[in-house]
Amino acid sequence: MRHEELAEKECAIARTWAVIGERWTMMILRECFRGVRRFEDIQAKLQIGRNVLTDRLQLLVHEGILDRRPYQERPTRYEYVLTQKGEDLYPVLLAMLRWGNRYKVDEPPLQLMHKNCGHMLDPVTVCDSCKEEVHRQDLRAYFSVDAW
Amino acid sequence: MRHEELAEKECAIARTWAVIGERWTMMILRECFRGVRRFEDIQAKLQIGRNVLTDRLQLLVHEGILDRRPYQERPTRYEYVLTQKGEDLYPVLLAMLRWGNRYKVDEPPLQLMHKNCGHMLDPVTVCDSCKEEVHRQDLRAYFSVDAW
């Protein structure tokens, strides 16, 4: 199977991975979530090839995750801004951050303070109905007939 | 920058992405979370090259995300089982599932019932202190001196 074929599978995870599961894509989104908007700034930070960055940004714009907007005329230059669809990927980043903080660093290089309550954020995944933390063994899966 | 160099950056997300951000890796973990344990079964499902699958499984075992255990002798055959470190990646999968259900499929091919409360699961990310749903604009970032 080719990576692109994931987009055609009847699976929300496969289709999501077809979009964000390329090398560098989540690192580019990390920069966007930090407020970086310009090609040159992302490129300077990540030190990746311009063609790779161009390719990934095009995909993210095509998918409606980033919006490409002019910020300067003569010559026209563009910046990349997260759409709502892009913002909605933030929980994926938070889940990665939590795991990385636990397993991949000694002291978290980044800490997030939740301004609403004043505490340092520990982002947990809960069931929206009962607000309990979700554990895999508490779930029962129902697949539709054509689920992959 | 090479992809492997992400592992050396002072950033929990970069280091996490260095592990799970290869093509196919999250799809392999999806199979593991579904209870699939054997090389042949994962390979049959994903239809990817055996060398790619071997490479990804080796990385996941090396990282302590999967445990490689013998399940048969003469010849010895192995199965791959999620460790606690692997189980702790489940929120990443849930966050992807939620986004994919919203944006990438019409009808969710997979629905998860939360047995604790009997409702279909909508997995939301909350602050563990105040239990409120987390939005990016409610967060203030603090970087350590050597954060990337």
Image: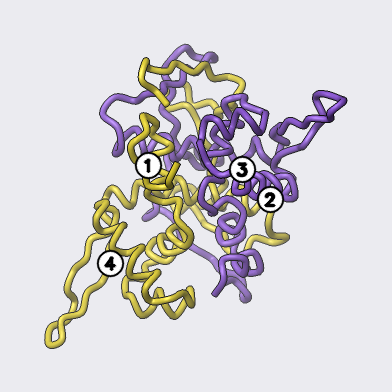
Chain colours: A purple, B yellow
Q: Quick one: label 4 or label 1, which is nearer the N terminus?
A: 1
Residue A50, label in figure: 3
Image position, residue B28 (x, y; %): 42, 64
| Location of residue B90 with respect to B130 vertically, above or below | below
Q: Which residue is mark 2?
A: A59
Q: Which residue is mark 4?
A: B80
Please indicate whether residue A6 sits to the left or right of residue B21 in the image: right
Q: Please name which of the two marks, 4 or 3, marks the residue nearer to the observer.
A: 3
Quadrant of image for the N terminus of chain A: bottom right
Q: Chain of mark 1?
A: B
Residue at 33%, 75% in the rendered image = B39
Asked which secondary structure carries label 1, the reply is helix
Amino acid at the residue labelled 1: Glu
- Report crowding for label 3: few under 14, some 14 to 19, many 20 or more residues within 10 A (C-alpha): some
Image position, residue A55 (x, y; %): 65, 50
Please indicate whether residue B108 sits to the left or right of residue B17 in the image: right
Residue at 58%, 34% in the rendered image = A43
Looking at the picture, do discs 2 and 1 lie on one chain? no
Asked which secondary structure carries label 2, the reply is helix
Q: Which residue is mark 1?
A: B5
